[in-house]
Image: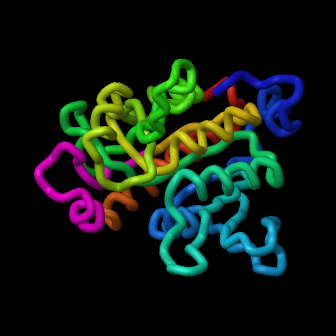
Amino acid sequence: MAPPSSEEPAAAQSAGAGAISKVLVVIAMQTEALPLVTRFQLVEAAADESIFPKGAPWTRYHGDYKGLHIDLVWPGKDPVLGVDSVGTVSAALVTYASIQLLKPDLIINAGTAGGFKARGAGIGDVFLASDVAFHDRRIPIPVFDSYGIGARKTFETPNIVKELNLKVGKLSTGDSLDMSPHDETAILSNEATVKDMEGAAVAYVADLFSTPAIFVKAVTDIVDGEKPTAEEFLQNLISVTMALDQAVMQVVDFISGKCISDL
């Protein structure tokens, strides 16, 4: 992410000078969110206490843990279809609103992802993303093509990587669970180890407002494997969510009492 500027939110500026105090966890699915809610003993904000605009299905849990105030947000259920509001649009919207209203010192985008065995990913592996990019925004016009890909480095956390011994890889984001031939070409070009449906969108919004963000992704399915993606994803979702929960707890434990520059 871009370094803090003089125009960024006060919370981000203060984080550079002192210990991190406010952490925002952005997560896409209820199944991924609830173990963390339990782990950190967070409480759901009542409907009449919602900080979000009327009509938005977004849900916030909050609480204090080891000297940190944690807000966990997820986009909620689609009002018509009742399924998790996954994808880049919902992720970008809830991230934007949460940055403006909660002014976090640090964002953790946690979630499940597909992995590529050709790049060393296996079921249950947890990665910190070193880079993010989109693989389904194809704009074949000079400069617009680079904008569409939206490649950017994430906020570097060498001490977290060293201390927790997490794998590191590039993350590619798109709005489809499966992988079309066009997507595959773009993902290979992005040199991605994992693919998801939110990360690059969260990174884009965080970058706009100079808010450091890190990306913790646990592998539910092997994209270049033998099993159908949807089948393998559903088969492993619950067990891999437990690995994600454990990794996020370790990251938050490491963050406790530290400054942004210590990560």
Does the magenta portion include 221? yes
**What coloring was used for the rendering?**
rainbow
Residue occupying the far front of the picture: 141
Residue occupying the far left of the picture: 226
Q: Is residue 157 visible?
A: no
- Magenta stretch in the rendered image: 217-235
Q: Position of residue 164 (x, y in %)?
A: 44, 36
Image quarter (top left, top right, bottom left or bottom right) of the N terminus: top right
**In this picture, residue 241 sits left or right of residue 131:** left
Tell me which residue sits at (56%, 26%) in the image: 144
**In this picture, residue 28 sits left or right of residue 236:** right
**Figure check: 86 above or below 152:** below
Q: Position of residue 230 (x, y in %)?
A: 27, 62
**Figure check: 58 above or below 164:** below
Of the pair 70 and 75, the residue shown nearer to us: 75
Does the magenta portion include 45? no
Specify the quadrant of the image occupied by residue 172: top left
Image quarter (top left, top right, bottom left or bottom right) of the C terminus: top right
**Figure check: 142 above or below 170:** above
Tell me which residue sits at (11%, 51%) in the image: 226
State how many labels appear.
0
**Figure check: 155 above or below 39:** above
Q: Is residue 70 visible?
A: yes
Tell me which residue sits at (56%, 74%) in the image: 77
Tell me which residue sits at (46%, 57%) in the image: 245
Q: Position of residue 107 (x, y in %)?
A: 65, 44
